[in-house]
Image: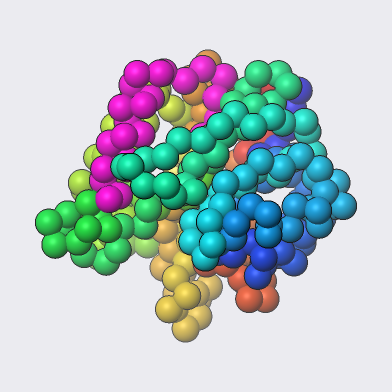
Amino acid sequence: MPFTIATWNINSVRLRAGLVEKLLREQAPDILCLQECKSPVEKMPADHFAALGYPHFVARGQKGYNGVAILSRLPIEDAGHREFTGRPEARHVAARLSNGVVIHNFYVPAGGDIPDPEANGKFAHKLDFLTEMRDWFRAERPERTILVGDLNIAPREDDVWSHKDLLNVVSHTPVEVEALGKVQEAGGWVDITRKDIPDGRLYSWWSYRARDWAASDRGRRLDHIWASPDIAGAGHGSMILKEARGWEKPSDHAPVFARFDL
């Protein structure tokens, strides 16, 4: 069952429902995973997406913050969710395809501005969240599983516009990169994007603060598609739709795509 999957931090699914529609019409992924929906589930525009040919919808939401959703042209069933660090936040949801493949959709905490867990509770929360992810996948090693989402870490030197300048900037600090690496190692996860595009700078996020984001191109690859090792060989065709960052009233993230022949 071949399918294309995309992941996108939409930064308010209600505010940017038109951009989601544009993506669905122009790119037509079979499955779209959204993060930072910023809406209770009952107020997400699921009926609108169903009318566009995506009738299958699994989500977790909360008013004004976080929120994750999976919409699909293919039948999916709700495979539950997990709460991390003892907080009832909508940062994870899972769905199962008819062929048994499980899709995990994550929105990892951003971590604030100060990369010091003693001085910054948000950064401590991020590291604790990653530790719990690591422990989960170490205890229950995934099989026939795809993990996507805004993981809020750019792990490689060529995943940021300047490794030197961002070493002390949250999202690329050594402690975060190490923590994400342990999550990846615990599950045996394969970074499908970098498997397909192993060389060169690659970004999926550009700050709203940039006067001309495209000209400065000071991006970071915060959004990821991973696969468990048993199906990683079926993943290919990776792409980041950079042009979406330039759409009217855009998210600061661009959608990331991959195709799986399963």
Give the position of the N terminus as an image quadrant. Answer: top right
Q: Residue at x 77, y 31 (%)?
A: 75
The residue lying toward the viewer, choosing from 189 and 20, is 20
The residue lying toward the viewer, choosing from 221 and 197, is 221
Task: Estimate the x, y position of residue 158 in percent, counting from the top left.
Answer: 37, 51
Q: Residue at x 81, y 57 (%)?
A: 48
Q: Is residue 2 above or below residue 110?
A: above
Task: Estimate the x, y position of residue 130 in percent, counting from the top left.
Answer: 32, 40
Q: Is residue 120 above or below residue 185?
A: below
Choose top left, top right, bottom left or bottom right for residue 235.
Answer: top right
- Outermost residue, left side: 118
**117 in magenta:** no
Q: Is residue 159 above or below residue 198?
A: below
Q: How many marks?
A: 0
- 101 displayed left or right of 75: left
Can residue 105 be seen by looking at this rendering? yes
Task: Estimate the x, y position of residue 54 in percent, counting from the top left.
Answer: 80, 45
Q: Residue at x 56, y 52 (%)?
A: 61
- Outermost residue, bottom side: 211
Give the position of the C terminus as an image quadrant. Answer: top right
- In terms of secondary structure, what is the magenta stretch mainly? helix
Magenta region: which residues? 125-148
Task: Estimate the x, y position of residue 250 in percent, counting from the top left.
Answer: 61, 71
Q: Residue at x 49, y 23 (%)?
A: 228
Can residue 224 be seen by looking at this rendering? no
**145 in magenta:** yes
The residue lying toward the viewer, choosing from 85 and 251, is 85
- 193 displayed left or right of 187: right
